[in-house]
Amino acid sequence: MSTEAFEAAVDHAMLYEVGGHWEVTPEVEAGLVETKAQRRAVGYVDDPLDRGGETKFGIAKNANPDVDIYNLTWEEAKGIYFHRYWQAGHCGELPPRVAVLHFDGCVNHGIGRANKFLQRALGLNDDGAVGPQTLGAANEADPIETCLAICDQREKFYRAIVANKPNQSRFLKGWLRRIDEMREFTCNPEQEF
């Protein structure tokens, strides 16, 4: 897949990681967080109930302990997304619509868990390591069916989080909205990627 595909996938992910107001401006590019408006524009949060910890552009400190989240710029965030999520998740080797959804899963759940969702959707052993077998199966399978099955896996996972940790229920509505919208976006046969 091309650089443009990555750009489209990361831009779409920002609708959830930052919010529907996502827009790249000079302040956003610089990653400014001095004012409430700037923090909102880059999705900067440090909510003690959020298991990701300090987060900006969707880059969570708990998953990226080596990153200075507070001073992170948009260009640095895109570099992290490309190397640590897109490439590490083998997104560029998947059918385009599956790649967009899998990238979103890598960002939201971590690569290992997203890989397991992909493997389960394909009816494979879910060892969490994407290799030739997973990639071959993904490229032979119907991409819309694969996307539907991945979304089902992700929804089940979100519901299990809340069942096990009720204090996370405040996030469930947003998580489920994300899955519903990703299901609609990636499973629409008229949507081109």
Image: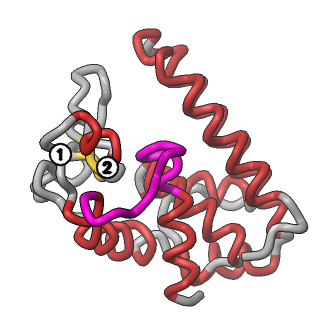
Between marks 2 and 1, how big is the CA–CA gap?
A: 8 Å
Disc number for residue 33: 1
Disc number for residue 24: none
Residue 104 pos. (x, y %): 53, 56
Instruction: Read off the residue under disc 2.
Output: 42
Magenta range: 13-27
Query: What amino acid is labelled 2 in the image?
Result: Val
Viewer-side residue, 31 vs 116: 31
Query: At 21% across and 54% down in the image, what residue appears?
Result: 64
Residue furthest toward the top?
166
Residue 29 pos. (x, y %): 27, 66
Residue 172 pos. (x, y %): 55, 23
Q: Are marks 2 and 1 in contact (CB under 8 Å)?
A: yes
> What element does badge 2 sit on?
helix
**Residue 119 location, quadrant:** bottom right
| Residue 51 in sight | yes
**Residue 30 location, quadrant:** bottom left
- 46 left or right, relative to 115: left
Viewer-side residue, 124 vs 191: 191
